[in-house]
C-alpha cells in the first residue's frame, strides 16, 4: 500500500450529502476482481449520458458535460470535498478502489460511512473528518477560486492553502500510523509476527495436546 505523508491537489467540490457506495460505483461493475480499472466507472450513473452501459467500450461512451468530473480543472482533481455521511450504504470496497483509480488521494467530509472510512484506511486513501464550519469555508473557497488547491499534511494533520488559510483535523493514532507507513491490516499484523510466533511457541509448550497431528 502506498504510504501517505503529504499531498497537494485540486479540490473537487462535490456538494452532496449521503452519497452512497452504489452511486460511487454501481453494482454492475462489481464482477471485476482487480483493484485497478474502476476509475473509469466512478460515479458512472451521472458521469455518462449512457449510464450503466457495460457493453460499450469506455472510449466510445458519451460523457455528461454537466457532471463535475468531466469539467476542467476538476477532471484532474485529487481531493474530493463532500457533505455529511459520504460513503454510506453497502460495504463494497470497490467504491474506494474507484476513487483511488481515478486519482483521488483525499476525501474531506464532516462524516463518513463507517465501513467506507475503514476501507479508505486499508487502501491508502485519506478520509479527513472536518468540522462543518471548516467544510463550509472550503466550499466557499472553491466557489471563489476555480482550481482551488490544498496541501494535505497527515503528519501535522493540517489542510493548507497559503493564500486562504489553514484547517486542522484530527485522526485516530492507529489509522494515522497505518497511512503514514503504508500498512493495511495485514501489514500491521505482520509487524507483530515475532510476538505472535513467541505466543504460539509458548502455547504449544503449555498445551501440546492441542497440536497433535
Image (cartoon, rainbow, N blue to C red):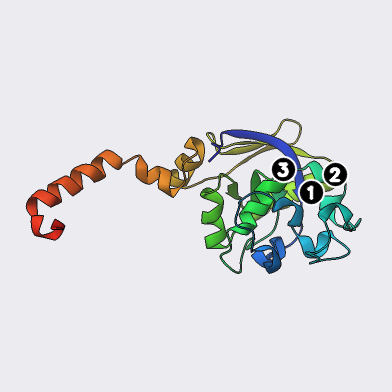
Q: Earlier in the sequence, mark 1 or mark 3?
A: 3
Across and down, in percent, residue 129 comes to 58, 51
Image marks 2 and 1: residues in contact by CB distance under 8 Å: yes
* Residue drawn at 30 percent across, 41 percent down: 193
Q: Which mark is residue 196?
A: none
> Horizontal placement of 46 versus 192: left or right?
right
- Judging depth in this view, the residue of 119 and 5 nearest the camera is 119
Q: Nearer the viewer, residue 168 or 182?
A: 182
Q: Residue at x 69, y 63 (%)?
A: 29
Instruction: Tell me residue 147's x, y (percent).
Output: 82, 40
Mark pair 2, 1: CA separation: 6 Å
N-term-proximal mark, 3 vs 2: 3
Instruction: Give left or right: position of 188 versus 136.
Output: left
Q: Which residue is mark 3?
A: 78
Indicate the position of residue 22 as horizontal and vertical percent values: 68, 67
Nearer the observer, disc 3 or disc 2? 3
Q: Residue furthest front?
A: 213
- Residue 101 to residue 67: above or below: above
Question: Tag 1: Cα neighbours inside 10 Å, few (<14), some, or many (≥20)?
Answer: few
Instruction: Please name whichever residue, 67 or 171, is drawn nearer the observer in this view of the structure.
Output: 67
Q: Residues within 10 Å of mark 2 (few under 14, many from 20)?
A: few
Query: Is residue 182 depicted above or below 205 in this figure?
Result: above
> Which residue is found at the position 51% from the left and 41% from the top?
179
Where residue 63 sits in the image (x, y, percent)? 88, 56
Which residue matches tag 1?
A: 140
* SS for dot 3: loop
Task: Report which residue position mark 2 lands on.
Answer: 144
Q: Is residue 53 above or below residue 138?
A: below
In the figure, is residue 176 to the left or right of 50?
left
Q: Quadrant of residue 33?
A: bottom right
Amino acid at each position: 500500500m502506498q504510504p501517505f505523508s503529504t499531498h497537494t491537489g485540486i479540490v473537487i467540490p462535490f456538494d452532496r450529502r449521503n452519497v452512497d457506495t452504489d452511486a460511487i460505483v454501481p453494482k454492475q461493475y462489481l464482477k471485476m476482481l482487480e483493484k485497478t480499472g474502476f476509475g473509469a466507472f466512478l460515479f458512472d450513473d451521472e458521469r455518462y449520458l449512457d449510464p450503466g452501459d457495460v457493453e460499450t467500450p469506455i472510449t466510445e461512451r458519451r460523457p455528461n458535460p454537466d457532471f463535475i468530473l468531466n469539467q476542467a480543472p476538476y477532471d484532474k482533481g485529487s481531493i474530493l470535498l463532500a457533505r455529511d455521511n459520504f460513503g454510506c450504504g453497502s460495504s463494497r470496497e470497490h467504491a474506494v478502489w474507484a476513487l483511488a483509480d481515478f486519482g483521488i488521494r483525499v476525501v474531506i467530509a464532516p462524516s463518513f460511512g463507517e465501513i467506507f472510512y475503514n476501507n479508505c484506511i486499508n487502501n491508502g486513501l485519506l478520509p479527513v473528518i472536518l468540522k462543518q464550519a471548516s467544510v463550509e469555508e472550503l466550499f466557499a473557497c472553491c466557489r471563489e477560486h476555480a482550481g482551488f488547491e490544498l496541501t494535505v499534511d497527515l503528519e501535522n494533520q493540517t489542510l493548507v492553502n497559503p493564500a486562504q488559510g489553514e484547517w486542522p483535523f484530527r485522526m485516530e493514532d492507529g489509522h494515522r500510523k497505518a497511512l503514514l507507513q503504508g500498512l493495511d491490516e495485514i501489514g500491521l499484523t505482520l509487524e507483530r509476527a515475532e510476538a505472535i510466533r513467541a505466543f504460539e511457541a509458548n502455547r504449544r509448550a503449555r498445551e501440546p495436546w492441542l497440536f497433535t497431528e
